[in-house]
Image (tube, helix red, strand yellow):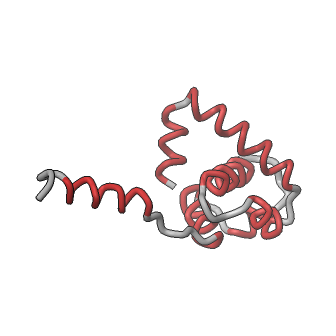
């Protein structure tokens, strides 16, 4: 009848293929909740923390998602795509050296 672990492997593979689709609004809400800011401040053109880091975190999370595009975030925030991409890449680089920051991003 086959390997005893067949069903376990099959279920594991099925779980790997299934990933819930994120919505832009969910990412924005999670980032705003984590950084304790509102969506208006996230879209505000200020360059001060925590808004700038929150925007970078949102961009990074969207880059990592399977179904969201950075252009959607850019449209929502009225931000340039290149700027969002650069800020996400800077945050990713910082997070590789700062385990607490990386943990925070994963928690979002």
The image quarter in which residue 23 lies: bottom right
The image quarter in which residue 71 lies: bottom right
- Which residue is found at the position 20% from the left and 59% from the top? 7
Q: Is residue 1 above or below residue 38?
A: above
The image quarter in which residue 72 lies: bottom right
Question: Can you give x and y, in whole percent of width and height, for residue 67 in the image?
Answer: 63, 65
Total marks shown come to 0
Question: Can you give x and y, in whole percent of width and height, for residue 36 in the image?
Answer: 59, 60
Question: Can you give x and y, in whole percent of width and height, for residue 55 in the image?
Answer: 71, 54
- Which residue is found at the position 11% from the left and 59% from the top? 1
- Which residue is found at the position 43% from the left and 64% from the top? 18
Q: Residue furthest top?
A: 97
- Which residue is found at the position 47% from the left and 64% from the top? 19
Q: Is residue 37 above or below residue 53?
A: below
Q: Residue furthest front?
A: 1
Towards the viewer: 59 or 5:
5
Q: Is residue 62 left or right of residue 4?
A: right
Question: Can you give x and y, in whole percent of width and height, for residue 81 in the image?
Answer: 84, 55
Towards the viewer: 99 or 47:
99
Q: Is residue 15 left or right of residue 98?
A: left
Q: Is residue 93 above or below residue 69?
A: above
Towards the viewer: 20 or 12:
12
């Amino acid at each position: 009848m086959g390997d005893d672990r067949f069903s376990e492997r099959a279920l594991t593979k099925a779980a790997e293929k299934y990933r819930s689709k994120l919505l832009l609004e969910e990412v924005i809400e999670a980032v705003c909740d984590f950084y304790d800011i509102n969506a208006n401040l996230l879209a505000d053109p200020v360059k001060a923390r925590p808004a700038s880091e929150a925007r970078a975190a949102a961009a990074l999370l969207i880059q990592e998602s399977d179904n969201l595009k950075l252009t959607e975030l850019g449209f929502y925030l009225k931000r340039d795509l290149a700027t969002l991409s650069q800020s996400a890449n800077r945050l990713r680089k910082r997070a590789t050296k700062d385990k607490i920051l990386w943990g925070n991003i994963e928690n979002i």
